[in-house]
Image (cartoon, rainbow, N blue to C red):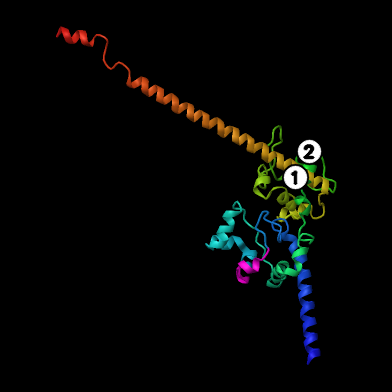
Amino acid sequence: MKRYLITAFVIVFLVNSVQAQDGELLFQQCKACHTIGQGKLLGPDLLDISKTRDAAWVKNFIKSSQSMIKGGDPDAIALFEEFNKLMMIDYPLPDAEIDAIVKYIDSFSSPDTEDNVKASAVDSLAAVEKENYLARIDTDENEARGKALFEGERKFKNGGASCISCHHVNVGEGVQGGLLAKDLTQSFSQIGGLAGIKGIIEFPPYPAMKDAYTEASLTEDESVQLQVFLMRADKENSMEASSVTGFLQQGIIGMVVLLVIISLVWFRRKKRSVNFHIIQRQR
């Protein structure tokens, strides 16, 4: 009897191990938007997802978050609002594959693996979290090279299409970009900073990007240069927006002051003609 119990335990262990490995492989397509225990990106951190959502909800959300939002699910709508109303792509995966992904995510909730979270392959964005990362990459040269890559003045090493084919970024002396996909002017602040940009570049979540870059992935240097270009473009436009806002505020204040002065002058004006009293006396 003891032998059978041991055999059954081994079988269960092996099955779970295989599922976890499959889940790790399947989770690659989630990395652009999610981490496990490393904070928010385009979407929420998925650590302990099974403790906060039931299995049926998770499956339905992965398969079609858009349907749940349109159907009025309060939790789905709350996530949609929290993450800049960015709609998650529908993933009509078989239940078995979703189970494998969730099991892989759940494996990081165990105290035994807590110390391994940062070293895990799940954290494809670990370099971004190094304290000196931004200081090392934020240079004028990287910005210029990133702009040239984005606009197609420089070719990607592996032959990928230039970003400007589908996207636009509003920068000084910039070239008008395509309108087939999202304007990336404020992508840095909208999709999780450098980590979000890096994640999308390395693990494209969108079908068009997958088709374009699966066989023509960007090099690490190219990724860094685009990150810096998009980061600075976002900051530049934020400063311009602040300047415009300040100018408008000053203009409104000036207009109010002018109206007050005009009102005072108007109420203190002479309401009768200069000869009014003389004419009245003659009567």
Look at the magenta stretch and give its main secondary structure: helix
Residue 154 at least partly seen: yes
Q: Nearer the viewer, residue 200 or 238?
A: 238
Q: Residue at x 77, y 42 (%)?
A: 135
Q: Residue at x 30, y 15 (%)?
A: 270
Highlighted range, magenta: 47-57
The image shows residue 173, relative to residue 219, as above or below, that is above
Q: Nearer the viewer, residue 13 or 144?
A: 13
Q: Nearer the viewer, residue 101 or 260?
A: 260
| Outermost residue to the right | 157
Q: Which amino acid does the dot numbered 1 rest on?
A: Gln
* SS category of the residue bearing label 2: loop
Q: Residue at x 56, y 58 (%)?
A: 78
Marks 2 and 1, how far apart at CA: 11 Å
In the drawing, does residue 279 fall left or right of residue 210?
left
Callout 2: 10 Å neighbours few (<14), some, many (20+)?
few
Of pointers 2 and 1, the one earlier in the residue sequence: 2
Q: Which amino acid does the dot numbered 2 rest on?
A: Thr
Where residue 16 appears, as percent x and y from the top left, is: 76, 75
Where residue 198 appears, as percent x and y from the top left, is: 75, 50
Where residue 53 appears, as percent x and y from the top left, is: 61, 67
Label 1 sits on residue = 227
The image shows residue 209, relative to residue 185, as above or below, that is below
Callout 1: 10 Å neighbours few (<14), some, many (20+)?
many
Residue 59 at least partly seen: no
Q: Which mark is residue 139?
A: 2
- Which image quarter: residue 40? bottom right
* SS category of the residue bearing label 1: helix
